[in-house]
Amino acid sequence: MKDAKTFDNPSYYEQFNWKAPKSELLEHLEDMVYYKTIEEMKKISRKYILLTVPNGEIIEKDFIECPNCGQIFNRSYHLRSLSENKIKECFSGYRLVQSFEYGSGKRGYSPFLLKIKHRLAPSSSWIPNYWTRNQSRETMCPRCEIRFTYGYRFDVLGLLCDFLNIVLSPHKPYWLFVLLGK
Ligand SMILES: [Zn+2]
């Protein structure tokens, strides 16, 4: 694992003769588009593919519910969680040149606790104020396209799940850098 200093240093990348496609989008793509995009990336890359994706994100942690149609979606519209292993699987024919985690830490969430929270606590309590400030709570439903603000309403069970989760899920760097080579 490399430290962020390497990542911040532009000269580091020059050695790869920068003709590599780069992405911060794979996590947003539906299955069909996702696999097509990977095939395209393989076609246009001469030698390297650089990916920066959220690091094994628990996308359900950031679920919100549309008050109009009931659609439940990740507030950053992320549709998939990516890890080094998943990337290696999808980019067969490429070898891993380098990978490291970087960026500020974000706590994961126990899938079991999330299930309890989503089933038993109202959706208004899923994303507490200490995760997201009020200014960034504007969103649009990807299904019915209405704009709304997802407020926060205190709920004992929701809070209890969050507290238990602090014990179960450590922080980890938010981003994953993966450099693949042909
Ligand atoms: Zn909706």
Image (cartoon, rainbow, N blue to C red):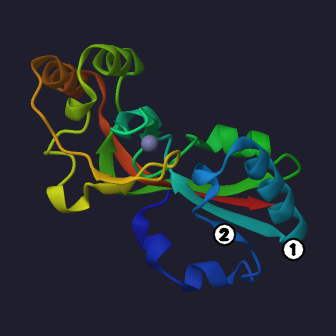
Give me the C-alpha separation between circle 2 and circle 1: 12 Å
Q: Residue 137 appears at what percent x and percent y?
A: 25, 54
The answer to whether any part of residue 182 appears in the image is no
Q: Determine if the C-beta at disc 1 is less than 8 A from ligand 1.
A: no
Q: Is residue 132 above or below residue 167?
A: below
Residue 132, x across and y down, in percent? 21, 51
Q: In this view, does 123 lie above or below 78?
A: above
Residue at 41% from the left image edge and 72% from the top image edge: 5
Residue 111 versus residue 175 in the image, above or below: above
The numbered mark, 2 or 1, whose residue comes first in the sequence reads: 2
**Horizontal placement of 56 versus 179: left or right?**
left
Q: What residue type is labelled 1?
A: Arg
Q: In this view, does 113 lie to the left or right of 12?
A: left
Of helix, strand and loop, which one carries label 2?
strand
Quadrant of the picture in which ligand 1 is shown: top left
Q: Which mark is residue 87?
A: none
Give residue 20's position: percent from left, percent from top: 74, 74
Identified at 43% across, 36% down, the residue is: 69
Front one among 25 and 82 = 25
The residue at which mark 1 appears reads as: 46
Q: How crowded is mark 1: few (under 14 residues within 10 Å), some or many (20 or more)?
A: some
Q: The C terminus lies in which quarter of the figure?
A: bottom right
- Hey, which quadrant is residue 48 in on the image? bottom right
Viewed as shown, does residue 33 lie left or right of 3?
right
Q: What residue type is labelled 2?
A: Lys
Q: Where is residue 45 in the image (x, y as percent from the top left)?
A: 83, 71
Q: Name the residue under label 2.
A: 22
